[in-house]
Image (tube, rainbow, N blue to C red):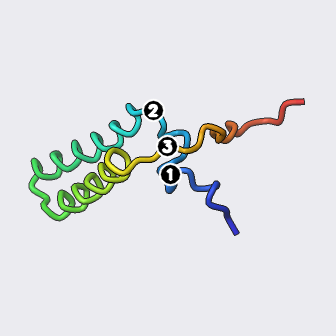
Amino acid sequence: MRRQEDFPLKDASHPFFRPLWRRIAVVAVCAAWTVVELTVGDPMWAIMTGAIGAYAAWVFLIAYKPAPDGTQAPPEPGPPTP
């Protein structure tokens, strides 16, 4: 069974999302994709990406609570260091 730590993108308080620019980038990409879908005339995908963008704005900008200072991002995968 996988632990919650194995899914960092499902955890809004993960240290990866601590910098404000990363949280804004996630919301901006969702908003930009919504505009793209509206431009090409696909309202269903526009609604879906707009809902994801609204949820991301809520989670990452409005209700965001950073992780405690003691937590660190997991180390990058690679060969073990001796």
Pick whichever of labels 2 and 1 is earlier in the sequence: 1
Give the amino acid type for the residue marked by disc 3 in the picture: Pro
**Which quarter of the picture shows residue 78?**
top right
Query: Quadrant of the image for the N terminus?
Result: bottom right
Label 1 sits on residue: 9
Q: Position of residue 43 (x, y in %)?
A: 12, 61
Q: Secondary structure at mark 1?
A: helix
Neighbours of disc 3 within 10 Å: few (<14), some (14-19), many (20+): some
Q: Position of residue 12 (x, y in %)?
A: 47, 50
| Residue 68 shown left or right of residue 25 in the figure | right
Gap in angstroms between the C-alphas marked 3 and 2:
10 Å
Gap in angstroms between the C-alphas marked 2 and 1:
14 Å
Gap in angstroms between the C-alphas marked 3 and 1:
14 Å
Label 2 sits on residue: 19
Label 3 sits on residue: 66
Give the amino acid type for the residue marked by disc 1 in the picture: Leu
- Marking on residue 52: none
**Which quarter of the picture shows residue 27?**
top left
Q: Residue at (21%, 60%) from the top-left corner?
A: 45
Residue placed furthest toward the bottom:
1
Q: Residue at (17%, 46%) from the top-left corner?
A: 36
Pick whichever of labels 3 and 1 is earlier in the sequence: 1
| Residue 19 shown left or right of residue 33 in the figure | right
